[in-house]
Every structure is written in C-alpha cells, then in structure tokens.
Amino acid sequence: MITAHVQPVTLVLKTMDHADVVNVFWNWDYNKDPWWETDMYTYEMLEGGYLDVLQGFGFVDAHLKQSVIINKPFNPLTIKEWPDTVEKLIADNHLPDPPPPTIFNIFLPTQEKNLDSECLGGKSSFHTVIVTNGAEMGWIQSMLSHETAEAITDPVFKKGWSAANGTEIGDICGTSTSYGSGVVSLLYINRTCTSGSFNIVVQESH
C-alpha cells in the first residue's frame, strides 16, 4: 500500500482524446545511441494497452507517426524556452507540422546527462515531452511513460488533471513497474496506482 498526500483535484480543460507522437533525437549517433530501442519502446507503450487506463479521461488513442534526427548544435535551454524553440524548428522545417494535438518527444544529446524530464504546452496545441537520454534505458522508459500520460491528461499545465499543489497523474505514485519489454510509470487513477495490469491501493492523507 502507498500513502499519498493528495489535495483536491480540479479539471478545467478537456484532456487530449487522441495524439500523434513524433520522436525527435537531437544529435543522436545511429551507431551508439539507443534510438531504435527508444522507438520500439515508444510504439509498445502507445499501442500495447498501457494508456487504456486513461479512457476515463476521454482519451482514445495515440500513435507514433514519425521519428526525426536533428543534426545541429545544441545550446542548453531553460524549460520556458522549449515551446518557442519547437515552434521555430517547425517553421524552419527541422520538424514536421502535423495537425494538433501532437506530442513531440525530444531526446537530448548524450552529453546532457543532468536534465530532468518535463512536459510543456505549446502554442499550436502540441505538447513537448523533454527527456534526457544520458541515463540508462529504464530511466528513459519510466520518464517517457510518465510524461506522455501527463501530456494527455494535463495538456496545458494545471488546466487539465492536476491536484491543487500542482502534482499531475504521474507524480503521486512516484514509482515504476515492469511492462512488456521495459518499464512504465505507475499512474494515479481512482485512488489506485496502476499500469493497467498492475495495481497498488493508495491510502490518501490530505
């Protein structure tokens, strides 16, 4: 059993009912970096039933539509600079411009080892999911599943599913479990930490 400090939840904006997903590998090396494993995991996570637990939020499906490698210098950015950066990459034809809602998973260069993951709303109704690839594959999988679920249920921060203290659906449980060939983040749904096939009852304390 997990004890979670949960504050009242507000739901202001409709969550994503579907999404196209684009994996973006920034200066990844075809021969050294696990881009193939990351693409395969993304496909399995999206298509394998993990996100079915979000159907109660109105979510239907998400599909991996494209993978892109960007070969250009990377300058460290603040979290707030990422939405404008993605907009510029689209305008400069470095990224595709599919119809919204689109989730861009941006995997940073291997030397950027100290960056956390974050999901950010964009100006064109897309959501960016930023994941450092400097850690081991299990960490990438846990963070990618975590941020994807939060991108779907809280497309604009604190306008979708979020607690009063700002925590989102992947934050409360704070742990992962095995899923398919990898791992996924447990999600807080109906007072349960769940991956669909694995559940832990949550004892709430306000």
Image: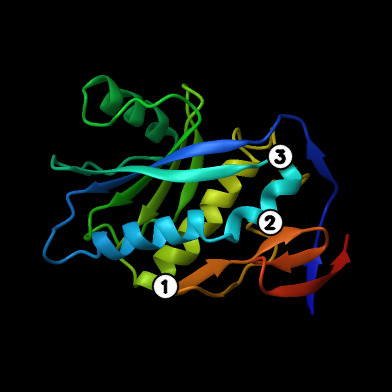
Q: Residues within 10 Å of mark 3 (few under 14, many from 20)?
A: some
Q: Which residue is mark 3?
A: 58
Check residue 167 in the rendering and tell me which mark sits there, or answer none. Answer: none
* Location of residue 23 with respect to 123 vertically, above or below: below
The residue positioned 21% from the left and 22% from the top of the image is 92
Earlier-in-chain disc, 2 versus 1 = 2
Locate residue 156: give its quadrant.
top right
Earlier-in-chain disc, 3 versus 2 = 2
Q: Which residue is mark 2?
A: 53
Q: Residues within 10 Å of mark 1 (few under 14, many from 20)?
A: some
The residue positioned 58% from the left and 59% from the top of the image is 49
Q: Nearer the viewer, residue 67 or 156?
A: 67
Mark 3 near mark 1, Cβ–Cβ under 8 Å?
Answer: no
Check residue 138 in the rendering and tell me which mark sits there, or answer none. Answer: 1
Assign a secondary structure to mark 1. Answer: helix
Amino acid at the residue labelled 3: Gly
Q: Nearer the viewer, mark 2 or mark 1?
A: 2
